[in-house]
Amino acid sequence: MKKIEAIVRPQKLDDLQEALAAAGVNGMTISQVHGYGTQRGFKEYYRGSEVIVKMLPKIKVEIVVPNDDCQRIVDVICDTAYTGEVGDGKIFILPVDEVIRVRTRARGMDAIN
C-alpha cells in the first residue's frame, strides 16, 4: 500500500474530491495547511502598509491506495490540480506497512475499503 499526500491550492479541492471519487477512492483525509515553496509568499497592502505574507494557504489531501493504483491516482491529482502556475502543489508518496481499522481490527486493504 502507498500513502499519497498531495498539497494543492484550496480552490481545487471540490474538483479534486469529485475526481478522486470518480476514480474509486473511498476515503480521504483533508487538512488546511500553510506553507511555501518556490512562490516564497507574496506582498499585500493593509491600510497603506506593505505586508509580506510568507505562508500561503494550501490543502493537504491524504489517501491510502493499493500499490497498483498509485500511479493512476497520482495522474488524477496532477490532471485535476494543474493550473500551469507556480504554486500548483506537490505530491509525496510513502510506503504504508499496515492499516488497522480500530472498530473491527480489520487489517490491510480490508481496513480501507
Image: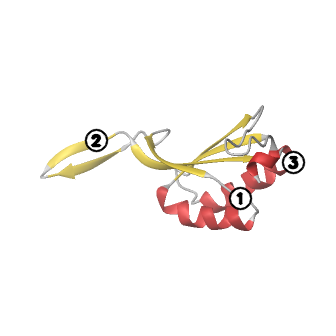
- Which mark is in front, 3 or 1? 1
Looking at the rendered structure, the kind of residue marked 2 is: Ile
Report, in whole angstroms, how far the alpha carbon at label 2 lies from the one at label 1: 39 Å
Q: What residue sits 87% from the left and 48% below the top?
A: 68
Mark closer to the chain start, 3 or 1 = 1
Residue 23 on image: x %, y %: 75, 63
Residue 18 on image: x %, y %: 64, 67
Q: Nearer the viewer, residue 106 or 91?
A: 106
Q: Residue furthest right?
A: 68
Left/right of residue 107 with respect to residue 16 in the rendered view: right
Tag 1: Cα neighbours inside 10 Å, few (<14), some, or many (≥20)? few
Tag 3: Cα neighbours inside 10 Å, few (<14), some, or many (≥20)? few
Left/right of residue 22 with respect to residue 87 in the rendered view: right
For residue 43, say whether it is visible: yes
Q: The residue tagged with tag 3: helix, strand or loop? A: helix
Mark closer to the chain start, 2 or 1 = 1
Q: Residue furthest top?
A: 97
- Residues tagged 3 and 1 counted as in contact (Cβ below 8 A): no
Residue 55 on image: x %, y %: 38, 40
- Which mark is in front, 3 or 2? 3
Left/right of residue 5 with respect to residue 68 in the rendered view: left
Looking at the rendered structure, the kind of residue marked 3 is: Asp
Looking at the rendered structure, the kind of residue marked 1 is: Asn
Q: The residue tagged with tag 2: helix, strand or loop? A: strand
Q: Quadrant of the N terminus?
A: top right
Q: Which residue is under mark 1?
A: 26
Report, in whole angstroms, how far the alpha carbon at label 3 lies from the one at label 1: 16 Å
Q: Which disc is residue 52 wearing?
A: 2
For residue 65, say whether it is visible: no
Q: The residue tagged with tag 1: helix, strand or loop? A: loop
Q: Which residue is under mark 3?
A: 68
